[in-house]
Image (cartoon, rainbow, N blue to C red):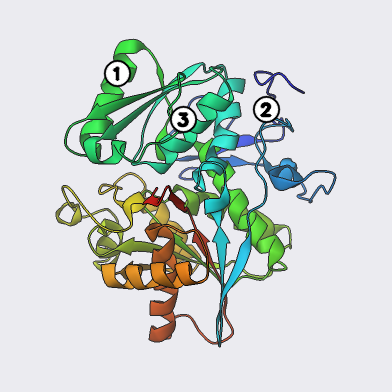
């Protein structure tokens, strides 16, 4: 199939609400019609298997929302041994992907899914990685899906892969201003708002990183460690491991560690207070920090879902300092791993939790190294 617009949805895939359990067919409605809850993709009558006729993500096509299309592909990324001590740490090196971050995965599924549902143009807000990956794909599909990326003045500097099919809109101040500008533009121009965290197709792409890791670890991982901003990858992880556990491919649900940095940690602080919602006073106005990809300061809408994943997997939230991030960044560089400071935050969290005894001897851990450096700069 060569026509990039001829994308077919997987008929075995359904939308399910993570809040009330309501089911629906695939559509551009990314929130539950019954309760406005978060929608996820589900494959209720599918027996998952790995199809070795294909490579990359298409080995897992039975639990992807679109049918095989050779144009939309994502090669497997390396799983690198980082620490082999009492506890073992591997790094899933996503910085080798074409857009230099794991967000390439979300777009390899989201872009064709949006096209299949009739989208020709979308708006979205980004702090860098997502916008860059969408811009990369906008150019790759040559206008089959046009992109409008809204970013703050600071984050617009982190958008790469400019092309005629992607327009960057810079909002003054912070990402909240970019959010407002994006929604106003979408309404005025009648352009579909891509959904951000609520877009289930993004999460379906991101879950393949965990699936590849589990496959390489012989389905035996005790702890996954992920740096979080909104935490959409965490939701994709949870849907995946519940399915794999239900079908007997994994014997236990891996714990999920969600990492934030000391200069922007509204989830960590709110969780430590036992709060069901993000506490307003913990939302920094204009956060700065080494881990630029996780500087989105207001995860109000996503936090309850991320908190649920952490609790159900018996995981934790972990804050790391700027010094800890810097030390782990140098550690990765010494191992010749092209990793950004956000990736380094996950390694810092492993070291911190191991020293505290939360990660125990014998634990097999995977840190998702979400991105690399682009021309020497953090993405």
Q: Which of marks 1 and 3 is nearer the N terminus?
A: 3
64 or 334: nearer the eye?
A: 334
Q: Name the residue under label 3.
A: 135
The answer, for residue 26, to whether it is visible in the render is no
Q: Nearer the viewer, mark 2 or mark 3?
A: 3
Res 9 label:
2
Q: Which of marks 1 and 3 is in front?
A: 3
Relative vertical location of residue 44 with respect to residue 337 in this rendering, above or below: above
Cα distance in 3D space between marks 2 and 3: 23 Å
Q: Alpha-carbon neighbours of circle 2 within 10 Å: few (<14), some, or many (≥20)?
A: some
Q: Which of marks 1 and 2 is in front?
A: 1
Q: Alpha-carbon neighbours of circle 3 within 10 Å: few (<14), some, or many (≥20)?
A: many
Give the side of residue 60 with respect to residue 169, left or right.
Answer: right
Quadrant containing the N terminus in the rendered view: top right
Q: Residue at x 59, y 35 (%)?
A: 109
Q: Where is residue 376 in the image (x, y as percent from the top left)?
A: 40, 52
Helix, strand or loop at mark 1: helix
Q: Earlier in the sequence, mark 2 or mark 3?
A: 2
Res 185 label:
1
Cα distance in 3D space between marks 1 and 2: 29 Å
| Residue 362, image quadrant | bottom right
Q: Alpha-carbon neighbours of circle 1 within 10 Å: few (<14), some, or many (≥20)?
A: some
Q: Residue at x 68, y 23 (%)?
A: 7
Q: Position of residue 73 (x, y in %)?
A: 67, 38
Give the side of residue 286 with respect to residue 223, left or right.
Answer: left
Cα distance in 3D space between marks 1 and 3: 18 Å
Contact between marks 1 and 3 (CB within 8 A): the answer is no
């Amino acid at each position: 199939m060569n026509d990039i617009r001829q994308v077919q949805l997987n008929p075995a895939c359904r939308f399910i609400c993570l809040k009330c359990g309501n089911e629906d067919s695939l559509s551009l409605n990314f929130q539950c019609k019954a309760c406005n809850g978060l929608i996820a993709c589900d494959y209720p009558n599918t027996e998952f298997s790995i199809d070795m006729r294909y490579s990359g993500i298409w080995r897992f096509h039975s639990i992807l929302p679109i049918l095989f299309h050779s144009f939309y592909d994502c090669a497997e990324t390396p799983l690198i041994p980082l620490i082999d001590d009492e506890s073992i740490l591997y790094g899933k090196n996503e910085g080798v992907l074409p857009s230099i971050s794991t967000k390439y995965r979300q777009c390899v599924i989201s872009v064709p899914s949006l096209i299949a549902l009739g989208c020709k143009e979308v708006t979205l807000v980004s702090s860098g990685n997502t916008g860059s990956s969408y811009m990369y794909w906008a150019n790759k599909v040559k206008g089959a899906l046009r992109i409008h990326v809204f970013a703050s003045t600071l984050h617009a500097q982190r958008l790469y892969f400019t092309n005629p099919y992607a327009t960057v809109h810079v909002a003054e101040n912070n990402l909240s201003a970019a959010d407002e500008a994006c929604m106003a533009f979408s309404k005025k121009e009648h352009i579909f708002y891509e959904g951000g965290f609520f877009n289930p197709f993004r999460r379906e792409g991101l879950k393949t990183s965990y699936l590849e890791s589990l496959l390489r670890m012989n389905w035996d991982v005790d702890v996954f460690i992920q740096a979080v901003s909104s935490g959409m990858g965490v939701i994709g992880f949870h849907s995946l491991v519940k399915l794999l556990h239900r079908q007997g491919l994994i014997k236990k649900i891996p714990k999920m560690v969600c990492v934030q940095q000391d200069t922007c940690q509204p989830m960590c602080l709110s969780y430590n207070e036992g709060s069901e919602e993000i506490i307003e006073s913990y939302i920094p106005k204009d956060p700065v920090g080494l881990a630029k990809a996780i500087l989105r300061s207001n995860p109000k809408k996503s936090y309850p879902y991320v908190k649920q994943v952490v609790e159900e997997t018996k995981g934790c939230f972990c804050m790391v300092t700027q010094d800890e991030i810097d030390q782990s960044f140098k550690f990765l560089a010494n191992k010749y791993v092209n990793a950004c400071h956000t990736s380094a935050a996950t390694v810092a969290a492993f070291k911190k939790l191991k020293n505290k005894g939360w990660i125990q001897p014998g634990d097999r851990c995977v840190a998702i190294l979400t991105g690399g450096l682009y021309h020497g700069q953090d993405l």
